Image (spheres, coloured by chain):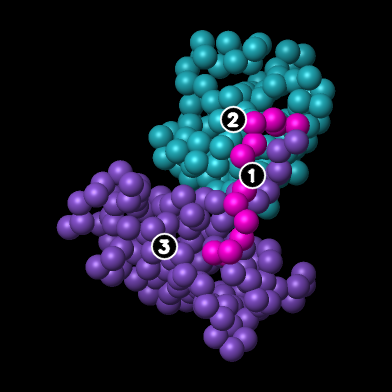
Chain colours: A cyan, B purple
Amino acid sequence: MDFLVVQSDEQRTVVRLTGSLDAVAVTRITMDFTRHVAMHRKATVVDLSGVEFIASLGIGMLVANAQALRRHSARMVLADPPKLVEQTLRKAGIDELIPIAHGPAEVEALLVG
Amino acid sequence: MRVVVQGDVGGLGRLAEAVGAFLRAHDLPAETSYAVRLVAEEAATNIVRHAYPPGRAGDIDFEILLAERGVVLRFEDEGRLFDPTTAPPHPPEVVLETAQVGGRGIPLLRAYAESLRYRREGRRNVFEIVVPAVADPRASSAET
């Protein structure tokens, strides 16, 4: 699992996750992810296009960071998850809590709400 | 295929490697492979997080095989009694602020598995999961 900050400025944070978001990966990246997402308190796009697998601990990491952003009136959008990853997010009910977007226009629309 | 791993994060990694090796050795549909990875991860994570006291990780005896009814995953541990099949359902959540951060592992197990069976054998938890050859049994009624 790789974690990359693509953009971080006054308006927003864009981060890209790549690989498997499983228990081992979450243990390794949670602190770094939280430092760049929740603690920035900006609207955040999490690019999931390179994620091939996500498990419940990975979902929990996303929910915890989205909650922290919400406390500061900032939104998180999950962008472009592959089909199987999106199925997992939807089976877990995450689409009810954090919007899932496909393509830049949808990301933009959901981010500004 | 059978492996015994330590019930800690390192053990989860080794168990995932074993599952990966099993999946590479069998020509399963992508959705089935994904479902197998997911249920293996969730079941093993449950053992690591709930079966053993912190700092006293025991073993996870894991077996995976391809049978007529699908991919069978069997987990055994000597942790405290924990029956995942009787865990209460995760409540529906529509409000992010009050949503639980965790608690989605067993619901995902239920969503991806065809059957979950638990029994206590002496001091051992025995948990068996079957993932059908087609990942979602509700998506196909034909058994081949």
Same-chain check, marks 2 and 1: no
Foreground pick, B133 / B82? B82
**Label 1: how many residues lie within 10 Å, few (<14), some (14-19) or many (20+)?**
few
Q: Which secondary structure class fits the magenta region best? A: loop
Task: Kindly tell me whether residue B49 is visible in this rendering.
Answer: yes
Inspect the image, locate mark 2, and give the three-letter code of the amino acid beneath it: Glu
10 Å neighbourhood of mark 3: few (<14), some, or many (≥20)?
some
Q: Residue at x 33, y 47 (%)?
A: B138
In the rendering, at what x and y percent does residue B143 appear? 20, 56
Q: Which stretch did the figure color magenta?
A: B84-97
User: At x 56% / y 81%, what residue is drawn?
Assistant: B120
- The residue indicated by pointer 1 is B91
Q: Give coordinates of residue B68: x percent, y percent.
A: 24, 68
Quarter placement of the C terminus of chain A: top right
Comparing B94 with B36, the one in front is B94
| Residue carrying label 2 | A96
Residues indicated by labels 2 and 3 sit on the same polypeptide chain: no
Spatial distance from mark 1 to mark 3, Cα to Cα? 21 Å
Q: Is residue B18 visible?
A: no
